[in-house]
Amino acid sequence: MNNPRFLRALMVMTIGAAATFGAAAQTIPSVPTFPNEQKDLVNAYLNGARELAGGDQAPAFLRRCILAQAYSMYSGDAEDPYLMPPIQVFDNLYWAGGGAVSAWAVKTSEGLVLIDALNNAALAADVLVAGLQKLGLNMADAKYLLITHEHGDHNGGARYLQQTYGLKVMATEAAWAGMTSANSPAKDIVISDGEDFTVGDTTFHFVATPGHTNGAVSSIFPVYDHGTKRMAGMYGGFGIPGNATNKMLQIDSLAKFAAVTAAKNVDTLLANHQTQDLSLFNHDLLRHRRALVPNPQSAADMADPHPYVVGTDEWQRFLKVQSMCVRASAARSAQVLPR
């Protein structure tokens, strides 16, 4: 085809498209760079964490060591506040949250213990409460609310739950000190490091794990898979802090929690964000989990493994991978941490 008018039109379109792309390219954010990174250390920690993670812990390594550090824009997108249906995860454990943040309910013989309260009163009512009710739970049975740390996405709905349903709110002293907004709950129960807190037939063990925030608290409690007892661990905050002092504090907290969970045979990984325990994927696996018999009475009656039950060794490696990712983050910014 040798049509002059067509060639001129094509040229105009090409130039216009190039100009448009050039203008758009000026506003496209670039991937973060680390001009002062200690490259040898970064290499050592990244590859050490990758080797330790193996195949089963690869998602944890890729998210915390690489995605959250080098491609934070994608890491943030993975926690957009999209809706997720509520689900019963274990015989005594229920999830009702969203893409941004998780909330849990533990059913005991003396009522419900909620873990975290979402971002605000509206989400606490429309997502958390409505989700638990959809699963057949009665909010009149809710007795306590545990706050894993003092960031608003975990306690924003606590005051509403406290005032509406009379829940007693539990947090560490440092977390109470950090909850200072007009929407913060009234101070009820202070959690102590190493404390056992029993509600009916369920005992929660609390471990203070500062780093992500000063008031972060981690917990250990039993869950049941068709009657088979497992021990669940939930770390209070995996987000890597900015300064070297708090990074080291987080590393120490991870080591401390690893020792406590090893002694208590923790084999089940739970988290307060769905990206950290792979809830988005685990929920779909749970919805399609197959039973070997019509009315399963134990985990052995299930054809498929429970996706949250990772095993004691895998749980320990998960925490060690998290720790190495903190060290990789420090090395990217030329922060010197003790070995």
Image: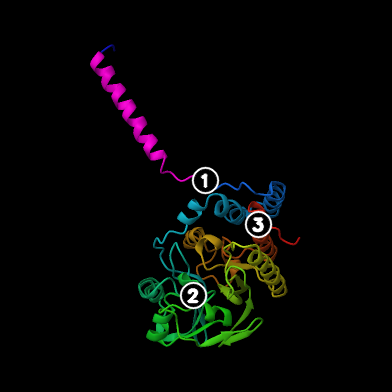
* Disc nearer the start of the sequence (2/1): 1
Farthest-out residue, top: 2
Mark 1–mark 3 contact, CB under 8 Å?
Answer: no
* Disc nearer the start of the sequence (1/3): 1
Question: x and y percent of residue 169 in the render?
Answer: 49, 84
Q: Is residue 11 magenta?
A: yes
Quadrant into which the C terminus falls: bottom right
Q: Residues within 10 Å of mark 1 (few under 14, many from 20)?
A: few
Mark 3–mark 2 contact, CB under 8 Å?
Answer: no
Farthest-out residue, left: 5
Secondary element at image label 2: loop
* Disc nearer the start of the sequence (3/2): 2
Whether residue 138 appears in this view of the structure is: no
Q: Residue under circle 3?
A: 330
Q: Residue under circle 1?
A: 31
Question: x and y percent of residue 91 in the render?
Answer: 52, 74
Question: x and y percent of residue 221 in the render?
Answer: 60, 77
Residue type for callout 2: Asp
Count the labels in the image: 3
Question: x and y percent of residue 198 in the render?
Answer: 59, 87
Q: Residue under circle 2?
A: 116
Secondary element at image label 1: loop
Residue type for callout 1: Val
* Distance CA(mark 3)–CA(mark 2): 29 Å
Residue range of the region highlighted in magenta in the rendering: 4-31
